[in-house]
Amino acid sequence: MTTTLSLLTPSGRLTLGNLLGALRPMSRRQEDAYYGLSDLHAMTTTHDPDLLRSRTFEMATLLLAVGLDRATLFRQSRVPAHAELAYLLECTAYTGELNRMVQFKEKGRGVAATRVSLYTYPVLMAADILLYRPAVVPVGDDQRQHVELTRDLAVRFNRAYGEVFTVPEITTPSAGARVMDLADPTRKMSKSADAAGSIFLLDPPDVVRRKVSRAVTDSETGPSAVRPDRESKPGVTNLLEILAACGGSATGITTYGALKKAVTEAVVAELEPVQKRYGDLAADPAYVTEVYAAGAARCREVTAPVLAAAQSAIGLG
Ligand code: TYM
């Protein structure tokens, strides 16, 4: 059996990037799959407890709405083994490797009030993964560095103390692994970014249309203007990639106006069923709570022997 695991952080509202880079590939692998909300990771920068609560619930509902109803769904904070293993992995990781993590370099290195958890974040993520001994971790491209660190820690721990962890493979989708911001196509579309460049999964069709119509392209005209070129045409390339990932085709499209129209239609068609199911599920919050409580109970069961094996190997057992 191929165990699969992935988590998403409730630090904002889910975007089209999360859908195409992670949620859709995840929905194709639901047998023996553990999919979670990394709520502990949502506190690595200034946060508001009420907002964290409401975003966590919205995200929990959305995971079901995109069709992840056959996997085991859970909240990281409800499975204490994650934090416990993270400490053992902090005793395995080196500051040299954490200093190189892009997220820490971009968001906090050198700033006195940076939370320690932003620094140790990749180690908790490694614990999230290794506790379940997954063969595959489906994620978007931006998580590659973290999964590579996880592999290094697994190998180091196994060599030093005995074979406890499986070394996981990362898998990223062929289209949609790195969806860029529509207003600034040189940076990735993000949950916490300003709303103009991010399409949120709960954006109604007219909002999607407006955001796509304002997407940054370039000033090229002529019959070959609609073509991918990440370096010199990042906006157009991003739209083409979104279109392909949503199952659309750019064949015969020669103007940016037509491209934007096709992208809008493809994205709206992708989001419509998700929004409908979200509406139904939001009317029954007790059901959502129940699914995640049952999922966490199962996660506590499957992770207990792995944590125990790690504790015993490292000298605590
Ligand atoms: P997060 O919450 O930032 O993103 C969730 C998933 O969505 C993918 N993603 C994207 N894919 C394509 N284009 C984008 N613009 C885009 N933005 C985000 C991410 O790659 C990710 O797969 N640290 C992780 C959560 C995490 C995790 C884990 C993931 C915690 N523990 C263990 C896998 C395994 C994060 O913050 O992802």
Image (spheres, rainbow, N blue to C red):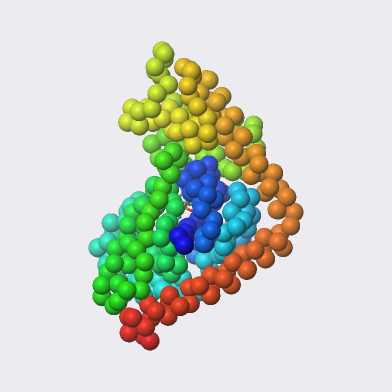
Residue 264 drawn above or below residue 131: above
Query: Residue 315's x, y, as percent?
Result: 32, 84
- Give me the residue at 32% from left, 57% from top: 148
**Which residue is at the far right?**
283
When asked about the image quadrant of residue 159, the answer is: bottom left
Q: Quadrant of residue 59?
A: bottom right
Residue nearer the viewer, 44 or 61: 61
Establish if 312 lies above or below 291: below
Name the spot of residue 231 as percent of width and height, x first: 32, 31
State left or right for residue 139 relative to residue 208.
Answer: left
Residue 9 appearing in the image: no
Query: Residue at horizontal 59%, vertical 54%?
Result: 68
Q: Nearer the viewer, residue 289 or 132?
A: 132
Query: How many tags in the picture?
Result: 0
Left of 76 or right of it: where is 107?
left
52 up-or-down from 315: above or below: above
